[in-house]
Image: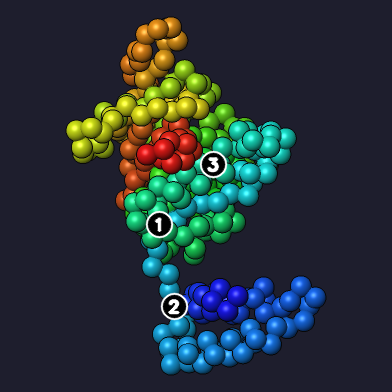
Amino acid sequence: MASCANAELWTARSVNVGTTASIIVEIAGTFNPHVIELVKTVYGEHRQYEPWLRDMQPLAQVGIVRSHDSLEFRPGARNDPSGQAAPHGEDFRGWCQALIAAHQLWDVVPSHLLDAKHLERFQVLLLPSVSCMSPAECAAVRAFVRRGGVLIADAETSLFDSDGHQQQDFQLADVFGASLAAQCSADRSHLHVEDQAFQASQPWGESTLPMTEGQWGVKAAAGARVLGTVRANPGLSLVSVLVATGEPAFLLSPCGTGRCYYFAGAIGRQYRRIAPAK
């Protein structure tokens, strides 16, 4: 108990927050005198470091958006316990895993904090299947990219408004460099990376990536660069073959002084499914 409380206290102080009640209060609501003494000891140890613990600024320059609206209001989300109807949750967790594996410093950005003030410290912003977005959120993301930020977005990001009503096109289509051409289909089963800069650096690496949930059909805008295309599964039995469709699956689009990378499938969701096995 003492070691756990000590660790929690040090963690709390290191991020400049107060002592959490969970380690002080007993189930009956009384204060644990032993933990109180430990709190005094730890705060005493921290006294000499207080000048460095005040007004600290986070170092993370990568932000990943967590969207309450996408989890709650995306059609079918509440009625599907598996989470299949709201891909944002699993896609978000997959991107978090990928960032950890890449040793990136990142912070979660709640969607209600998508504004210029909270985005100004980030260089890269991730929108993992952020299905439901308001006009104000879209405007903040657009401004972030135009002033030099890098945006990474995938799947159905911005296809629904904040109340869960599907739009005719992505609200951020102008930023993605991609417009909606067809609904998500499992037939678009693979992403083939065409651009050599993004292909696997090792000879055993794969340039064709499986996309278990399929991908959305998109059309590249003028000025967008197609970095990867869709490979389709024709459904032939006893034959392992993929058909090149030429449909965009991975695009790079300039926007102002920034740029956006858009994937037609839920990359984080796929990473979460296959990464533990590697």
Vertical placement of residue 165 versus 20, above or below: above
Q: Is residue 143 above or below residue 71?
A: below
Q: Residue furthest right?
A: 28
The residue to which callout 1 is attached is: 62
Instruction: Check disc 3 and report the residue beneath it.
Output: 90
Q: Alpha-carbon neighbours of circle 2 within 10 Å: few (<14), some, or many (≥20)? A: few
Q: CA distance from mark 3 to mark 1?
A: 19 Å
Q: Residue under circle 2?
A: 56
Q: Amino acid at mark 1?
A: Val
- Horizontal arrangement in the rendering, residue 118 relative to residue 149 (left or right): right
Q: Amino acid at mark 2?
A: Met
The structure residue drawn at horizontal position 47% and vertical position 27%, both measured from the top left corner, is 212
- Disc 2 is placed on an element classified as loop
Which is nearer the eye, 67 or 171? 67
Q: CA distance from mark 1 to mark 2?
A: 17 Å
Q: Give the image quarter of residue 83.
A: top right
Location of residue 22 by image quarter: bottom right
Identify the mark at residue 177; answer none if there is no mark: none
Q: Amino acid at mark 3?
A: Glu
Does the residue at mark 1 contact the one at mark 2 (Cβ under 8 Å)? Answer: no
Q: Nearer the viewer, residue 213 or 170?
A: 213
> Few, some or many C-alpha atoms within 10 Å of disc 1 (few <14, some 14-19, many ≥20)?
many
- Image vertical order of residue 212 relative to residue 111, above or below: above
- Circle nearer the N terminus (1, 2): 2
Can residue 207 be seen by looking at this rendering?
yes
Which numbered disc, 3 or 1, marks the residue that appears first in the sequence? 1
Secondary structure found at label 1:
strand
Q: Is residue 37 left or right of residue 78?
A: left
Structural distance between the alpha carbons of marks 3 and 2: 31 Å
